Amino acid sequence: MRFQNEADAITYVFQSIAQSGWKNRGLDEDTRDIAPTGQLLNLLELPAKKREYAVVTGSKGKGSVTAITAKLLQSLGHKVGMVTSPHLTTYRQRFRINGRMISEAELLRLIDEISPAIDVITEKLPEGKYLSPQGIFLAVALKWFDEQDIDAAVIEVGRGGRFDDNSLVPNMLSLFTPIMLEHTRYMGSTVERIAWHKAGIMKQKSYAYSVPQSPEVMTVLRQEAESLHTTFEWLAPADMGQLIEHTPEGLRVDFGRYGVVNLPMHGVYEIENASLSIWAAGNMHGRLDSAIHHASADYEARIRAGLESVFFPGRCQKLRENPTVYIDGAINIRSAKSFIESVELTHPVVTVLAVPTDRDVEGVYKLFAPISDQLILTQTPRNITIKFPQEAQAREVAEKLHDNVLWADTVSDAIQLAEQSAGAAGTVLMAVAQPAIGDAMLHYGLDYEVI
């Protein structure tokens, strides 16, 4: 065995990009190249087995849609693979079959087995080019899915789509969550350009579903679909589940045909994600062998059961009681508003903020400042590609908005300060980027072997 542990294997996976000078790269269309991943998949003859694929993109909610769609397909009797990114506490969380993440032994074995092909490709790459870690992870996932006879796979792309390695799978279904201005350094400075990147996951003569989008985004998606002769449909308000009430366990939602469902998720935005996922599962199920007909009562019952058992960590998740601690990746204006609307607050309210520099830091701070008795600013080095404001810069912005601002060097320190300030009766809100969510999960000892 070439690798002794996960750290050894991951160091190897990132070896090519580490040697490429990637830190200086600009727009994805100029600097990202998925051709080496295509070569790797061809060399390994992946995927070797036919299955249904959905690829999911968007600016928020794509992880939830991936998880909910996979859970619904599983509830319908299919064996389902899932690829998400980024992970929270271990790279193994990126790969799941029927909700269970890959074991360390399996991950090491798979990377070991494909490493000769990786070496062949990386040795021939010109200076400045690299074999993407995400492309290697895709090869790992497809090989594992082939070995385990997966019926369907739901795959989340990274920040974009058109130049994302995960878009190389032969997906007959493309799913679009809300698209907004983000990662402008890599995808461009307009929402239309962001949408163009994400529209690149569509394939010829396939299907694409979207939640409601701005007119600018919708125009881009429609044009892409028309150029590919792809059937493009989007959910209208009437297609959405309707919130009945918040419950201690999540949300009570009327999903129309599927009845009233106790959705075990606290974020109101998950209703939109679940509505899209219902469409997605139905589309994929229709092309899979099954005795469960779409019009049957059994189908409806299984969709309802899937909705009532779904879980995806880090999305408006309640981490503890006394004080009540909620965490969410609410690092843009839309998600921050939704996070605030989704939770019941008891004072004192302490908000922990870790908003990257490429987001509207001041805009997010402004939303949390009026509802908070204290703001605690922090950062994390977990993902070196995501930059956070340093203490002086973060304080300068926050102290214009609030008179009780603290800084914590680590997420764990921030949690301890927040819990002390909130006391047993208060509320802690954690509006933090994905790597900081991972730090919080480590703080509380949560790994989610199965979701």
Image (cartoon, grey):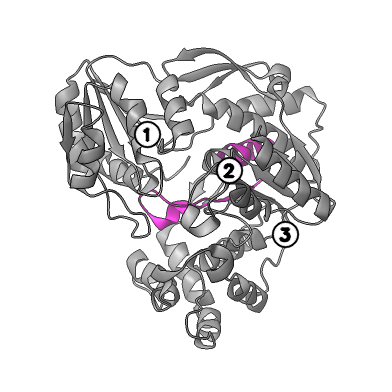
The alpha-carbon separation of the residues under discs 3 and 2 comes to 16 Å
Q: In which quarter of the image is residue 411?
A: top left
How many neighbours does mark 3 have within 10 angstroms: few (below 14), some (14-19), or many (20 or more)? some
Above or below residue 368? Residue 76 is below
Which residue lies at the image location 48% right of the left edge and 39% below the top edge? 451
Front-most of residues 224 and 311? 224
User: In the structure shown, which secondary structural element does the residue marked by tag 1 occupy?
Assistant: helix
Position in image of residue 433 (x %, y %) = 37, 44
Q: Which of marks 2 and 1 is nearer the N terminus?
A: 2
Which residue lies at the image location 82% right of the left edge and 32% below the top edge? 293
Q: Residue 66 carries which label?
A: 2
Is any part of residue 308 visible from this angle?
no
Front-most of residues 2 and 200? 200
Instruction: Please name the amino acid that badge 2 sits on.
Output: Thr
Q: Earlier in the sequence, mark 1 or mark 3?
A: 3
Which residue lies at the image location 68% right of the left edge and 51% below the top edge? 199
User: In the structure shown, which secondary structural element does the residue marked by tag 3 occupy?
Assistant: loop
Q: Residue 364 carries which label?
A: 1
Instruction: Please name the amino acid that badge 1 sits on.
Output: Val
What is the span of residues highlighted in magenta in the rendered image? Answer: 66-95
